[in-house]
Image (tube, coloured by chain):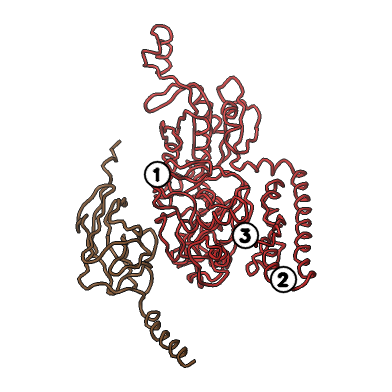
Chain colours: A brown, B red
Amino acid sequence: MKIISCVAVATAIALLPGTACSQGKTAPKDAKLYFITPYDGQKVRGGFWVRFGLRNMGVTHAGDDYQNAGHHHLLVDVNEPIDSKEPIPQDKSHLHFGAGQTETMLELAPGTHTLQLVLGDAKHYPFEPPVVSEKITIRVRPPASARSR
Amino acid sequence: MGEIRNFRSGNHDEPPPHGGMPRRLAAIIVGDIVSYSRLMQADEEGTHARVKRIERDLIQPSIVEHHGSLVKTTGDGFIAIFDSPVEAVRCSIVIQQNLIGRNASLPKHSRLEYRIGVNLGDVIVEPDDVYGDGVNIATRIEGIAEPGQVYISGAIYEQIKHKVVCGYESLGDRKVKNITDPVRVYRVLPDADAVGKTRSRRETALIFLLAITVMMLAAGVLWYLLAQPGRIGEQAAVPTASPVASPAVSPAASPSPQPLPSEAATQTPQPSPSLASAPTSPSPSPSPSAAPPREPEMIAIRGGSFAMGSNDDPTERPVHQVTIKPFSIGKYPVTVREWNECAAAKACGFTATGKDDAPVSNVSWADAQQYAVWLAQATKKPYRLPSEAEWEYAARGGTQSKYWWGDKLQPGMAGCKDCGELAAEQPAKVGSFKPNPFGLYDMGGGIDQWVEDCWHRTYQGAPSDGSAWSGSDCSSHVLRSGSWKNDSRYVRPSNRDGYDTNVRYPTHGFRVALSP
């Protein structure tokens, strides 16, 4: 009986920090997430490829719980800070790449946009400390096919 | 000018190889803004800008999408030609239905409404204009059309009457200015039932009586089923009682068994589909060996035609007309309790945690598909995921507004981040918000819902028969409804998004559909 209660208390204590603090798994300190293309300030026309770079960590499927591996999320024009206690949101400005993709074809409306990468763990939570890229700014020009009539 | 050339070519040259005289048979649409001069007088620049915007955002894309070509825009209208009368009429309906949506929030005097006339005729086509009797007749028909209506000539009617699911009201032969022969004119009613509504009171009364009879029968059967196990005794209380009660009532969510048959009946004026697909059909086949699974409550939806999509987001364009066959769809998203029966049968990948009546979440498209396959096998009924078109048709509940309840956000209607107090929390229970006009709960907000279709970035090339759009690269599928974590833009019935097929996410769930 005593043993059981001891175990119960021990598990409760062990689980407490997990529930109270962030869900995030720890990431190596030298992990680096970055854009291969486009570069900060680049001008693009129409649809363009975005390629994701990751150093000192691996890319895996969402749901796969391997150490030091995660999947990419591309944040388009997001101004809110990243909340490490919540899964990375899923909407039209938080694009998920849970199948382990490392690039995507992006089509954005003409104008200035910001892009940022965030690595998520198996359950879409940011790592601890967060593995994020620099926020870059790009300018999208109207498509060349818009002929003058 | 064109007519002179025509005269000449007819007399001297061989007309076809010369090619100078582009005569062809075409369906001609003529559209014209109602009270254009008054609107211009009230606000010249504003009106001009609005007209241009409608032409750019709605009229031009609709014409292109229906394989027509815009011949010209005049100050207050436009002329377009089509190879196909069917496409011409569909295009006209799409334009008119869209305008209804755009005008809904405006006061009456500042609404921009079009009259549209469609005719079939042999015309002379030049790069920036079109000539001939056929055009003149289309213009005259347009002139007698009511604001917001599509009027068509008899020639068009003969071509499309069995092809475009609409109501047509004959307005008889009309004498039109400067045309010798009278022209037969029909009014197009986008909703096929609009005709029935005006004409057959007696029929509706009969159907109503039939519905009541069916309801009473159903209630009787239900009472019999519910009362029986109680009388037989308690010896097998739990296992027998639950399968008997399950197909009719999802216990916590609906207070009494009556609303379900009555809703299904009132929503299906035609008695046959309501009888065929009403979920009450008392056949829980009491085989003692394998307990039948708990079936989600279903609502019968009768078929119809609607304008799918919107111009609010690039993914929702182009707005296109879709015809839906009768089907049934889950009254609520699939719940944790329902899901866990599949998990218990080892047919679904994981056991869901959370309250029994909460919508199941953190499911991938593949997970949802597994559940539908299991449910179909276990019940021997063709359960499946709804198609994207079916989902939107059901979510709109017969409306064309921004949300199913209108164009303005209202508290208590949906669960989302900025939909009002308490709406921003993970749903603990399905059906916590108001049902839409079809009696469906949580069609927008609450939990994201997978549908059958592959993800495509726009509707360019989408099917118009209500079937699921598969093919292409199916690594991601379509999500509908938006969740409690999204803002109110995502609650709109036309909102759509794609997500990786095999990836689970905490806000993703689904509901099932059933073919009749």
Residue B295 badge: 3
- Answer few, some or many: residues within 10 Å of disc 2's Cα (few below 14, many 20 plus, some between 14 and 19): few
Residue depicted at x 26% and y 67%: A132
**Dot 1 falls on which chain?**
B
- Amino acid found under the numbered disc labelled 3: Glu
Q: Secondary structure at mark 2?
A: loop
Residue B143: give x, y in percent of width and height.
55, 33
Is residue B35 among the parts visible in the rendering? no
**Dot 2 falls on which chain?**
B
* Mark 2 or mark 1, earlier in chain: 2
Along the viewing direction, whichever of B243 and A4 lies nearer the viewer: A4
The residue where tag 1 is placed is B472
Residue B78: give x, y in percent of width and height.
45, 35
Q: Are marks 1 and 3 in contact (CB under 8 Å)?
A: no
The residue where tag 2 is placed is B236
In the displayed structure, would residue B253 be above or below residue B326?
A: below
Q: From the viewer's perspective, is B270 left or right of A144? A: right
Along the viewing direction, whichever of B488 and A3 lies nearer the viewer: A3
Q: Are marks 2 and 1 in contact (CB under 8 Å)?
A: no
